[in-house]
Image (tube, rainbow, N blue to C red):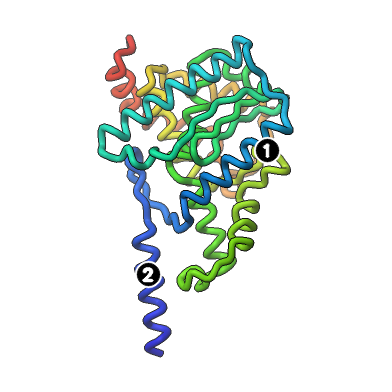
Amino acid sequence: MKFINLLEIGAVALMISACTTNPITGRSSLQLANNSQILTMSAQEYRSTLGKSKVITGTADAKRVVSVGSRIKSAAERYYQSIGRSGDLANYKWEFNLIQSNELNAWCMPGGKVAVYTGILPVTKNENGLAVVMGHEVSHALAGHGNERISQAMVAQYGGAILGGSISNAQWANVFEAVYPIGSQVALLKYGRNQESEADQMGLYIMSMAGYDPREAIPFWQRMEAASKGARQPEFLSTHPNPETRISDINKNLPKALEYYKASGAKM
């Protein structure tokens, strides 16, 4: 009985020590996984995905993806430096690529590995719309949502083995591949509703810090809904907030986002 109690105490201590607080939203999440391993595997899978895709370079659209991504990257780095957490991004090796695909999608892997699909560009329409998308996707990485999802999977599959540190490299790789099913398209990354909502909020703030108008977020998501032909599951079954909830949350976060926008030197 005492041994079981010690395990329980140890597990609780581990969970507490592994909790990470998002410096922008204040949300806490369990992040047990080794970030160094995550970044290494992410970089490998990113290179593999690019190698299997038609990467667009040199065009106006490709240059726009790099330009918007670079501004969002710089804004994030400035903010993290201002709060004394530059170390959070120290091992990021940012990349921004445009991939030929009809899918309405974009994604960012841990470490700042970003891809935007050409299919979403007609919906973004302009740099502000593109900043909404890229701010949202980059926020998944900054918030450690990959680590959180991997940690949830580790706990679900291996439970107490985590406490004893007995997870093998093969088991770790299996968990990573389950969370990031790269071979079947990175677009299928599955985040929870809380993570999607947090990426909306965080992305709204970061795009504002980068000098992009956060008021463009609402028309973008409305266009996205229209382009998706309105097909969606009820919110309680979906990993994404439904459009009404998303718009309501954006409106709640707009006043603070506009403060960041004004502070960036942009004209209101």
Q: Quadrant of residue 12?
A: bottom left
Type of the residue with mark 1: Ser
> In this view of the protein, can residue 65 be seen by the observer?
yes
Separation of marks 2 and 1 at Cα, in angstroms? 38 Å
Residue 75 drawn above or below residue 127: below
**Circle 1 SS class:** helix
CB atoms of marks 2 and 1 within 8 Å:
no
Position of 225 with respect to 15 (left or right) is right
- Horizontal and vertical percent position of residue 178: 64, 53
Q: How many other residues sit within 10 Å of disc 1, few (<14), some (14-19) or many (≥20)?
A: few
Exactly how many numbered labels are in the figure? 2
Position of 213 with respect to 136 (left or right) is left
Q: Which residue is mark 2?
A: 12
**Residue 48: mark in rendering:** 1
Residue 208 drawn above or below residue 187: above
Q: Quadrant of the C terminus?
A: top left
Of tags 2 and 1, the one toward the viewer is 1
Position of 227 with respect to 87 (left or right) is right
**Residue found 26% across the figure and 32% down from its top:** 82
**Residue found 29% across the figure and 13% down from its top:** 265
Closest to the observer: 254 or 170?
Answer: 170
Residue 267 drawn above or below residue 2: above
Q: Quadrant of residue 172?
A: bottom right
**Residue found 55% across the figure and 67% down from its top:** 167
Type of the residue with mark 2: Val
**Residue found 51% across the figure and 15% down from its top:** 127
- Horizontal and vertical percent position of residue 152: 52, 58
Residue 115 drawn above or below residue 130: below
Position of 189 with respect to 87 (left or right) is right
- Horizontal and vertical percent position of residue 30: 43, 56
- Horizontal and vertical percent position of residue 242: 56, 37
